[in-house]
Amino acid sequence: MSEVKNCRAYAKLNLFLRITGKREDGYHLMDMVNVETTFYDELQIMIDKRRSNHCYIETSQNFNCSLRKNLIYKAWKWYTKTTGKSVHTRVYLKKRIPVGAGLGGGSSDAAIFLLEINDIYKCFSREELISKSVEVGADVPYFLHGGLCRVTGIGEIVEPLPENDELKELKGIICFPGKHIDTKDVYEKFDENNEYFLYPNENRTVLPPENSLYHPAIEIYPLIERLMEEIQDTNPAYCGMTGSGSSCFGIYTENEQRKMKDLFKKKGYRTWEVNFIQRKRKI
């Protein structure tokens, strides 16, 4: 008998991102504050326990990705190999979150897929799934938790933060300049400068804004700098580039949000209004 689950995979913003070092295996050590937004992809996941191990993924027309590069497929392959379970699944992915935009869309899709199949097969506890899933992708553990979190290590250490009262009252806009950036290229550019930022392990709030990958990203794609300057000119309560780019965001009062969306849309950017999800995922 098959089970069908309809799910949303939410995009995140990095309110703070600092690279603190690099391991011998090449992975960068991070310190980040992430928050989920109400911008999402849609997934329909069908699982049939009667059939043999197989993963089929169908995507919307605006998303062309080979099966083996799709993080959902990678998550399926990791789960079946790690647990020894035979999982027959068919996934339809309606893609809204742009690829290469720093919003974590692929990782969020993979995380939701893992949560749903693990809910059926129950091979891991939630905590085990969060800690082990970094093998699928560095952002996957965060999306398995969701909400407002501090994320450290290479992404596997996820600590919930108290809900931020100021953030509850504010709204966001996300601006995508239309250029997809390869995360690998941004990290390689960062490594050319060999600059790592070390600081004590104090509790981190959402201020002040910082992203260690901003300058490497604008070297690759200078339009990001122009977009950030245009956002800063609107005097947001908070702003920044998310992830390794290329999306940037501004945070405003509710009255300003729609006005800013219209403004940046007229400037030629793909723009979305978002609210913030600070509580961890319920599943």
Image (spheres, rainbow, N blue to C red):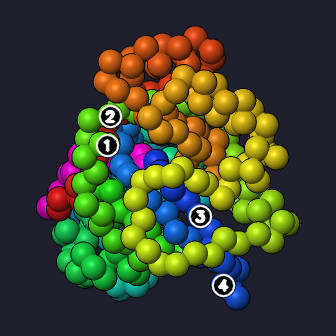
Q: Position of residue 84 (x, y in %)?
A: 35, 85
Does the magenta portion include 8?
yes
Amino acid type, mark 4: Arg
Q: Which residue is mark 2?
A: 170
In the image shown, does 33 or 244 lie closer to the viewer?
33
Q: Which residue is mark 4?
A: 23
Give the spatial CA distance, label 4 vs label 1. 34 Å
Amino acid type, mark 2: Leu
Q: Secondary structure at mark 4?
A: loop
Amino acid type, mark 3: Arg
Mark 2 Cα within 10 Å, few/some/many (few <14, many 20+)? some
Stretch in magenta = 1-12
Q: Earlier in the sequence, mark 3 or mark 4?
A: 3
* Quarter the C terminus occupies: bottom left
Q: Which residue is mark 3?
A: 18
Q: Earlier in the sequence, mark 4 or mark 1?
A: 4
Q: Which residue is mark 1?
A: 167
